[in-house]
Amino acid sequence: MSEAEVRLFELLDKAAASDLGAVPLSALQEACTEVPYVSSRLTGRRRYQLYSGLLLDKPPTVVPDTFREHAGEAGDIHKNVAARLKEVLSEDELLEDADFQGFVCYFATKTGCHFDDEMTGITLALATVIAAAELPPGTEKLFRLYQLLEVLRKDFVVPAASRAFDGSLASLLHLLLQYHDPCFSRHLDQRVVNIGVVLLDWVRRLFVVGDNFQEALRVWDWLLIMGDPTMTVYFALSYLVAHRQRFLAMETKEELTEALRSLVFVLPTRKEDAVNPALHDGRPISFLSLRSGKSLAQNADIAYRSTPHSTRRVIDALLFHDEGSLSKSPDALEGYYTAYTALPLERSDFAESFAPQAAPSALSYVVLDCRSRKSFEFARLPTAICVGDDVGFDNEKFDRVALTLKDIKGNHICVFGTGRPITEEFNLLKMMSLHLVQCGFPYVSMGGFRALIPLIKAKVITIKGAPAADTARGDFADSVAALKDSLTDLLPHLEFDKEEARRKAEAFGNKAKEGVQAAKSWGWSVVQSVGKRLVSSSAPSLAADSTAGKWANRTTGTGGTLVGAGNGRDDLRPTRATAAQHTFSLSVNDDDDEGDLDLITSVPQYTGNVVEYREGEQLVRGKLVAEGSSPPPGENVEASPTAFSPERSKTSKGILLEIDEEFDRLFGDSVSPRDPSSEAVMLPTERTPEGDARKD
């Protein structure tokens, strides 16, 4: 027995023999991560001790001395579940039918639990833990089962109320798989397999398929060690991706559907049984070979941290729905995600990633800006590449863009437009994102400039003018090359193992080592990351769905911060967004649609004769001119990248229209009415003939 096993078992014995909380939750989590193939070591009473230590961190619910007095209230469903429960605990001759029936009826009455197929399977799987726990015979086993099942259901089982959002979740989970594994997702799409429904079913069942309880428990071990209920989605996703080679070899819908439906979540117990996903597409941190429950948890954490912030928040809100946490109805949400060909980035994603001092955990996006070149030149995100003149409804143009982007394949890419409800633009963005997905680009998303407007006003993100090299037509390839050279600064500082570090170094050169922290081992770092993730969601205050974790911090001996349990399991999940926070900033039906077009409440008026610089960076052209006034002759007014402020003077409508009508120059058939006063500030070559016009 290794030293790590001895330490873990000592903690488990101490927790079982002492009062509640005698062994800190952090100590148990850390000890588990240090034991190789820990699930194989959790035999007999050990798994029960571990689950009690991880789940029962506050006084358990008081239950009656006996359950059999409630047997008379049991219905047919309760009796059927009780009969199956008796089979699991059949070795205890002191327990009779009335005890089991009363237990199921009492639990359902007190907790509001409905014993459907999913909940029944979860109950039976947990009962196998009780059966092996070497507890005294009789009702003591049912008492312990009640205590564990109550907390497990409350914290990790997806409630029945979330079924109203099944359509939304299925669409969102489909896009999530596409985001992480576009080739596998395309293989399933071509065979009309709704993988979102499959993933959601696994999450609802907590990986219990049929009577394969022991296999499910090995996944539970690590899910409970990590302590985050929303990680269930990423466990399911990671397990699916790990076995992608098996499913890619299947050619028919019927074969795929049956294999996915009957999939048993078997985890390797030896290195020789490792499953290699063979997913190497340029991403800096790829999924590791599935060698154990520990590597499954590691891959789930990689998937979580590589998923856009808003997507993680929405998944949590849909699965563990709180009244008022979402501003859209189930039907509207389903339509919202069904309309997209890639994950949509919301306002909070931009607030987090493009803040002046972005958090190390924030994702770094390469922005493919499909707006007109003039709009791009006027204002852009720091990592934007102008492709507005290089894309169109033409596969050859899409191919050229994809070919040019091959050197930055594997980075998070946002296909970016105005965010306006313009059908032609939206179709173009969808085709561009779908083409990148078909070319095998992972991490493809969609976004729009309109979502940035409140952030620009509040000065919480960085907006810059385009460098001279980007403003010249035909320099798209040069922009990509320049971006590739600076990828070190764009990649998030994530921890991964030495194998991944070497792979990344080969892909991006020795410079990658300067910008990425390669952990010597994973183990405890994943527990730290969970803690930091839940307690320090540090998006700027204006972010649409920023959140503060509710658990108390607990400092560990390793210098990391762990999520503590001082406030009880009620505080397990972070506070979710409310309807007033406008989580879905890309919706064409947002109330702030037209109001946001006053985005540029104070912009430099274009005069064509001033170019401002700061630290070698060309800023927005022109001077800040107060409405109704003009600057003193010769005065040079600097235009800051974050100068779009309500406190500054308003611009003329002509400048607004230059931004608002950018798609006139792309498509020529979406013309908005002009204000006569705009002609004074428009270039002669930009005036359009009078004629019929329509609003966007």
Image (tube, rainbow, N blue to C red):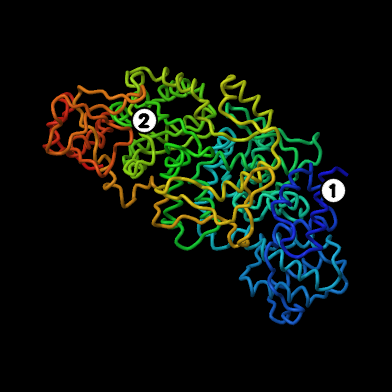
Number of labelled discs? 2
Location of residue 44 in the rendering, given as x and y in whole percent from the top left corner: 85, 56
Q: Nearer the viewer, residue 581 or 234?
A: 581
- Residue under label 1, please give it: 6
Residue 507 occupies which quadrant of the picture?
top right
Location of residue 287 in the rendering, given as x and y in whole percent from the top left corner: 64, 35
- The residue that appears at 33% across and 42% down in the rendered structure is 453
SS class, disc 2: loop
**Where is 470 relative to 244, above or below?**
above
Location of residue 579 in the rendering, given as x and y in whole percent from the top left corner: 41, 57
Left or right? Give the position of 454 relative to 572.
Answer: left
Residue 603 occupies which quadrant of the picture?
top left
Mark with earlier residue (1, 2) = 1
The quadrant in which the C terminus is found is top left
**Where is 497 relative to 558, above or below?**
above
Judge the density around disc 2: few (<14), some (14-19), many (≥20) Cα neighbours within 10 Å.
many
Q: Nearer the viewer, residue 386 or 631?
A: 631
State the CA–CA distance, disc 1 to disc 2: 59 Å
Left or right? Give the position of 559 relative to 172.
Answer: right
SS class, disc 1: helix
Location of residue 449 in the rendering, given as x and y in whole percent from the top left corner: 35, 38
**Where is 441 relative to 572, above or below?**
above
Left or right? Give the position of 29 relative to 476.
Answer: right
Q: Amino acid at mark 1?
A: Val
- The residue that appears at 74% across and 57% down in the rendered structure is 23
**Where is 451 relative to 140, above or below?**
above
- Residue under label 2, please give it: 370
**Residue 255 at least partly seen:** no
Depth check, mark 1 against mark 2: the one in front is: 1
Q: Amino acid at mark 2?
A: Cys
